[in-house]
Image (tube, rainbow, N blue to C red):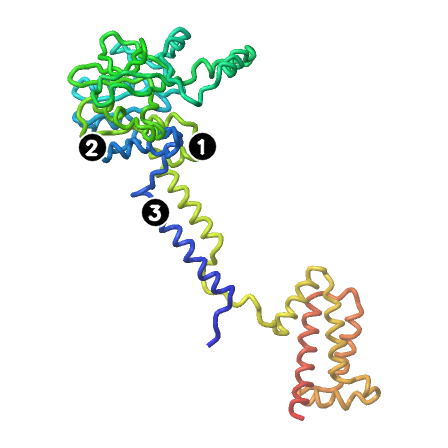
Amino acid sequence: MNQPSRNKRERRNAGWVWLFFLCLLIPLHLWFPELGTGALDDTYSASASGKKAFFLLLEMESYNTERNRVPISVFLQSLDYDETLCLLGPARYPSPQEWSAILSWVEEGGHLVMTANQSHPEFEIEALNIQVKYLDETERENLPVVKNENQGTEADKDDEKKIDSSDLLEILKDKHSLLEGQATTVFPDAPSIIWQTNARIISESGQKLISVGETQQAIRQKFGEGEIVVAASSKIFSNQSMIDGGSVPAFRLIESAGTPEFFVVDESLNASGTSKVVALLIDPTFRPLTIQLLITLLIFGWWHSTRFGPILSSHILPRHNIVSHTDNVGNLHFKNGNGRALLQSYLKQLFTELHLRQFRGKEHRVIDPIARRMNTDPEEITDFLKQASALAKSKKIKRHQMGDLIRRLGEIRQAARHGKQQG
């Protein structure tokens, strides 16, 4: 049995490839891998500024810890009051509508931990009269900064002060850069820690948890049946801080909000606060539409790469018979309006087969056998051949006349061939 050609095997295997990718796309409606939020400092990131190590610590030390990627105003409708919601330096702060939903949940018994993003730490909780603002120049100068080997010399500091005043970006960066201060806490197992900050908390009724110099860095405040912990920096939760020994004060700060058994770390504010193009398509809101679009494109590609219908013959076509060739030649002459050439060619071929030139003067030796087989008079056939030769040279012949002539000549030719086969 002949083996299928290589091209046929490749086409057959290509169909399985399309089916394989289709089977991969359909289950994505039910399960989709977590691909992070696009932020470099979220709980998915393993970079120095990320918070993945702290999230793993919460998972290890608590009964249940999870991430939230659903819009926070929707998620709070199903969040229990014995859980602690953590907003750890979000890429964007809650909107007024989201703040209203969060504070209503806290007032009824929820627990909230809110830390500022060091890139833009200023925010306000109007209902609690809590503000987070940048440190002013006086506060930065009076902050008890920790000395380390990485700090520049006095000459370097003098050079930094000589920065061109026209370079506004450099001035703002230096003005709002993070400072490492020696902080005091209310936690018995971490009374003193290194705290990185560029902001402070303004609150009159909150209980001070962490302070650097005269500035409040973390407070706890009762609100209704629940509690809120606000911190001016989220650097304590970074992966670098976990390496440097900040895991204990970071966990104690989260624990200060209430129950240490159930934690939810929100990532929806990171997902909606970072600029995304392709990542927006895999957002839970638009993900079903994206998967349907991919399936449509996959089916469209499969449709245009696969042959449908009955099995086609081999691409090496068999030779056409003489009838098919004659039809094609006739169609070409009909389109060009040159049908008389066909009659001339047919006559020339017929005379060649009958060898009339060889029997010049003795044509009856060829004509008589043909007439006998056709049951007709030899003179009639001779006159017909002369008439056909004359009409073939005439330009006034019509198409239906040529058709009649060719059919009649075909009968003569068949009779002549019949004699040869018998001989």
The one nearer the camera, 77 or 90, is 90
- Label 3 secondary element: helix
Name the amino acid, label 2: Ser
Mark 3 = which residue? 26
Q: Do the residues labelled 3 and 1 touch (CB within 8 Å)?
A: no
Q: Earlier in the sequence, mark 2 or mark 1?
A: 2
Alpha-carbon span between mark 3 and mark 1: 23 Å
Mark 2 = which residue? 62
Residue lying at the far bottom of the rendered structure:
423
Alpha-carbon span between mark 2 and mark 3: 35 Å
On residue 277, the disc is 1
Q: Picture coordinates of residue 174 (x, y %)? A: 47, 15
Q: Which residue is drawn at 33% across and 33% down?
A: 52
Question: Quick check: 208 above or below 65?
Answer: above
Q: Are marks 2 and 1 in contact (CB under 8 Å)?
A: no
Name the amino acid, label 1: Val
Quadrant position of residue 336: bottom right
Report whether residue 268 is seen: no
Quadrant position of residue 376: bottom right
Say few, some or many: other residues with alpha carbon within 10 Å of mark 3 (under 14 / 14 to 19 / 20 or more): some
Q: Are marks 2 and 3 in contact (CB under 8 Å)?
A: no
